[in-house]
Amino acid sequence: MADCIFCKIVAGEIPASKIYEDDDMLAFLDLSQVTKGHALLIPKEHQQDIFSLKEDTAAKLFTKAPTIATALQKTFDCEGLNIVNNNGEQADQSIFHYHLHFIPRYGNDPLFRWADNSNDYTQEDLQAYARDVRENFS
């Protein structure tokens, strides 16, 4: 896609600090460095988000994800690591080329923590939601 910054990185039109590359994917350090070592993994083929991601592309990306995570952990001696993927503007996706964020975590860094909203939902609510989701598998 001509106006996609990640496609331009893949094409070599924009430089990147590459940490891994093969025929199907590219991993590089994110310019924002939310934490030290923050990296992105992208498919080389333009696919917008999880809703349009091909299953074979997902399989390739997630097969390599543990290797990338381990290399980051060894390099930066992080205590943990978040793998995050935002899909759509409402989910804070800003570049519409599928990508996984690998965000090393260190001690009490100021990033988000998961909220516990379990008191807001009954077991019946959860069972009804599960049933509704099952009905939408294709």
Image (tube, helix red, strand yellow):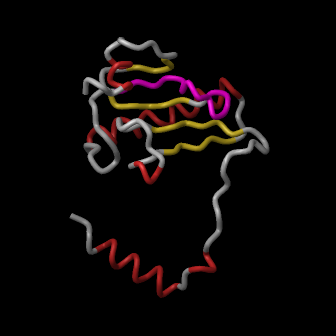
Q: Is residue 58 above or below residue 77?
A: below
Residue 26 among magenta residues: yes
As rendered, which of 122 and 94 lies closer to the eye?
Answer: 94
Q: Start and end of the magenta stretch?
A: 25-37
Residue 91 location (% of width, % of height) = 46, 52
Residue 27 location (% of width, % of height) = 46, 25
As rendered, which of 43 and 110 lies closer to the eye?
Answer: 110
Q: Quadrant of the C terminus?
A: bottom left
Q: How many marks?
A: 0
What is the magenta segment's predominant secondary structure? loop
Residue 75 location (% of width, % of height) = 66, 23
Res. 132 image quadrant: bottom left
Residue at x-position 51% and y-position 37%? 101
Residue at x-position 66% and y-position 51%? 112
Residue 4 location (% of width, % of height) = 33, 27
Q: Is residue 84 left or right of residue 78?
A: left
